[in-house]
């Protein structure tokens, strides 16, 4: 009886894994096909679609935009996120709960709502299309990830370490630089990487705010797909997948990926 | 000269009064233990000295400077935290040198002092290790070295030995005390372990509910507790209630409640037949004699209800009557092989070993305040709410449950 239910459990686990991973396998396999269409199983073997993907002008431009926006958003989120996390974990101030709520709200507000709201705001302000609009929007949705990871790190850090530093003659700022920051660095890096990934793969918000000259890579990808469905799409997707998986592995090494879940 | 002085200090956290009107002073070079159960305010008091807690009322002085408004990083106070709080990302040498870097002390001087401090705590050659590579005892020493290397005005220790096992703990007690004496550093040590407080300190401050119940030498705390709380918290104590039934010269005759037995205690002004008294006696002063044996003129008698073999001594619980019982701690073998449960025994207690407690309920408005010490102390207790019930002043307390001839007491260290 017990072994029976155990077996059933492990079958279910494998079924879920297959269900989740099968589409990825299809995409990766299709990317190395020699034919002109997305097919599975692939016919022949060729890396030519990879060559096409990295030489398609739209993809290159989109990658540049996404990369820049991602870096800027991650850096901005790191600075704002650390500040906010320190305030939340180390200080008590009126309206603290409200601040926490606002900081984490972008995680629960649908991106389409955020996108429409920001479009409305920028239109009202008559802000011209620019990279900054995109960066600002991405900052809003990525800050919560840094706040969460860094706050978790600060929460686990023994507050008497900071007291020891003060006791030994370092001011609050020096204590932050010499004790607090070095100790939360892994969390901060993890949060920033997460922020970068979130920004890099975002489509919905970008679509509202980017305008034609600042199309991001996901936008270019989608646009391309409207007209052509050749294995170059699969090749690009595979490369994105590789980057994301690589970053996730780095994250896991730095931080432990299970700690990034929203509700602990 | 005082190195540390608290003047009517209070602190409340919301509704909770953590520290209530505490005044005390510690002489330069003295070792003060703050002793009390958890939540008694001792740690809050320590954190006030470090500058992490601002007193709500009252003033804190360090070396004659009022430091209420001085932030922690300008106080020059060394602190050893309960969990050591070593910086995990720094080596042992960097940890110890941390306060010297903050003081912008030149590198060669810094290295010399770090080395010196590590030698003092017997950790030479550990300088390159990280805290996680050290045992609990070693981490403890690093924390100590880090606190003393800055040559602080005061050294604060927040239950630093709490997490060590017994053997190591005892060794560290000795080491901390030796180091403190060598350096002549004024030290305040927070602990809930009364043995630790008695064995290590020049002065012990017993705290309860935010108040300083008594401040005195270990011997005074043990032998002449000022309050019932101190008597109960420090060591084991027996308490007997009774009524004065007669006066006889220097002594009062008291009938023990729940019995028909009488005992003699030193007389005090106001004693008259009918006056209720509460008296306390330490278990090691309670002598037992075999009924019918040579010592059978004992004034009290009772029945052994319980005996526990403790190795060096045996602990008996003797019932004198209804609701009146005494714990007796006897050196093993001295009373002729000991007694078994149910044995009838004579009980003898020298009158000067009794200590008189003020009646309950206690009203001790002034007791926490104004207990200052100038190292020698004894006078401050003369005016206390409780007079001492006449153990002869200078010399003989009883202690260590070793009996030779009469009752020859000696508890803890003599004050330095």
Image (cartoon, coloured by chain):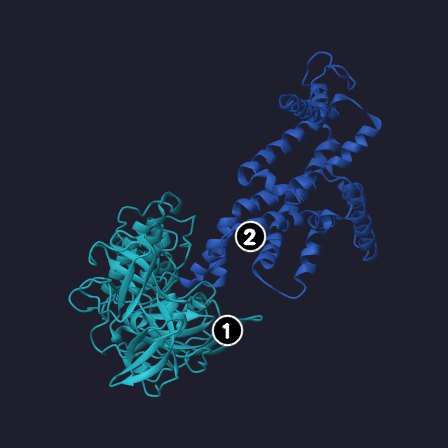
**Mark 2 and 1 residues: CB-CB less than 8 Å, in contact?**
no
| Residue A150 spot, x, y in % from top left | 58, 49
Q: Secondary structure at mark 2?
A: helix
Q: Secondary structure at mark 1?
A: strand
Q: Which residue is mark 1?
A: B11
Decide: is A25 above or below A75: above
Q: Is residue B402 visible?
A: yes
**Chain letter, cyan:** B
- Which one is nearer the viewer's eye here, B158 or A142? B158
Q: Residue furthest left?
A: B405
Q: Is residue B29 visible?
A: no
Location of residue B121 by image quarter: bottom left
Q: Residues within 10 Å of mark 2 (few under 14, many from 20)?
A: some
Q: Residue under mark 2: which chain is it in? A: A
| Residue drawn at the location 47% of the way across and 67% of the way down | B52
| Disc number for residue A227 | none
| Disc number for residue A155 | 2
Query: Quick check: A83 left or right of A199?
Result: left
| Residue B129 spot, x, y in % from top left | 35, 44
**Chain letter, blue:** A
| Residue B273 spot, x, y in % from top left | 36, 85
């Amino acid at each position: 009886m017990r072994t029976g239910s155990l077996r059933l459990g492990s079958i279910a686990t494998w079924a879920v894994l297959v269900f989740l991973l099968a589409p990825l396998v299809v995409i990766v396999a299709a990317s190395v096909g020699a034919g002109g269409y997305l097919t599975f199983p692939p016919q022949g073997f060729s890396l030519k679609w990879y060559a096409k993907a990295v030489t398609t002008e739209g993809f290159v431009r989109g990658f540049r935009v996404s990369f820049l926006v991602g870096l800027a958003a991650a850096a901005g989120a790191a600075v704002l996120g650390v500040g906010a996390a320190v305030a939340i974990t180390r200080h008590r101030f009126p309206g603290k709960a409200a601040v926490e709520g606002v900081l984490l709200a972008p995680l629960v507000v649908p991106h389409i709502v955020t996108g429409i709201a920001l479009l409305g705001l920028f239109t009202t302000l008559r802000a011209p299309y620019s990279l900054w609009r995109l960066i600002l929007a991405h900052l809003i949705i990525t800050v919560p990830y840094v706040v969460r990871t860094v706050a978790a790190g600060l929460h686990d850090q023994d507050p008497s370490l900071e007291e020891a530093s003060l006791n030994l003659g370092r001011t609050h700022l020096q204590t932050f630089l010499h004790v607090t920051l070095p100790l939360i660095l892994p969390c901060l890096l993890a949060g920033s990487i997460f922020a970068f990934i979130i920004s890099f793969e975002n489509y919905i918000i970008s679509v509202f705010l980017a305008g034609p000259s600042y199309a991001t890579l996901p936008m270019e990808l989608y646009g391309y797909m409207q007209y052509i469905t050749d294995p170059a799409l699969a090749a690009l997707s595979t490369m994105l997948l590789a980057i994301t998986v690589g970053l996730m592995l780095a994250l896991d090494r730095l931080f432990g990926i299970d700690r990034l879940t929203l509700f602990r | 000269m005082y190195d540390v002085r608290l003047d009517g200090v209070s602190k409340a956290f919301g509704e909770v009064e953590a520290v209530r009107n505490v005044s005390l002073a510690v002489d330069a070079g003295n070792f003060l233990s703050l002793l009390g159960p958890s939540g008694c305010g001792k740690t809050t008091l320590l954190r006030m000295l470090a500058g992490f807690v601002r007193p709500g009322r009252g003033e804190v002085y360090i070396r004659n400077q009022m430091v209420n408004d001085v932030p922690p990083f300008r106080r020059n106070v060394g602190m050893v935290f309960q969990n050591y709080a070593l910086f995990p990302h720094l080596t042992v040498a960097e940890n110890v040198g941390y306060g010297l870097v903050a003081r912008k002390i030149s590198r060669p001087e810094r290295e010399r002092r770090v080395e010196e401090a590590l030698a003092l705590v017997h950790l030479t050659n550990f300088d390159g290790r990280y805290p996680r590579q050290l045992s609990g005892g070693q981490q403890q020493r690093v924390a100590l070295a880090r606190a003393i290397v800055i040559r602080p005005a005061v050294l604060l220790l927040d239950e630093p030995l709490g997490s060590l096992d017994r053997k190591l703990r005892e060794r560290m007690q000795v080491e901390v005390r030796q180091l403190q004496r060598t350096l002549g550093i004024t030290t305040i040590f927070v602990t809930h372990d009364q043995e630790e407080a008695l064995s290590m300190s020049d002065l012990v401050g017993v705290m309860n509910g935010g108040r300083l119940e008594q401040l005195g030498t270990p011997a005074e705390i043990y032998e002449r507790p000022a309050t019932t709380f101190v008597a109960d918290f420090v060591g084991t104590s027996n308490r007997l209630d009774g009524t004065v039934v007669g006066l006889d010269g220097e002594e009062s005759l008291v009938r023990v409640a729940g019995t028909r037995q009488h005992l003699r205690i030193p007389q005090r002004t106001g004693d008259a037949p009918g006056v209720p008294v509460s008296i306390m006696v330490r278990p090691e002063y309670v002598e037992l004699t075999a009924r019918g044996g040579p010592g059978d003129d004992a004034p009290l008698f009772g029945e052994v209800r319980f005996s526990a073999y403790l190795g060096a001594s045996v602990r008996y619980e003797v019932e004198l009557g209804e609701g009146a019982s005494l714990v007796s701690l006897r050196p093993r073998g001295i009373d002729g092989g000991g007694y078994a449960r149910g044995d009838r025994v004579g009980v003898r207690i020298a009158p000067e070993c009794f200590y008189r407690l003020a009646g309950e309920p206690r009203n001790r408005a002034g007791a926490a305040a104004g207990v200052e010490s100038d190292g020698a102390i004894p006078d401050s207790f003369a005016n206390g709410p409780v007079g001492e019930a006449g153990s002869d002043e200078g010399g003989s307390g009883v202690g260590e449950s070793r009996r030779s001839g009469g009752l020859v007491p000696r508890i803890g260290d003599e004050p330095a």
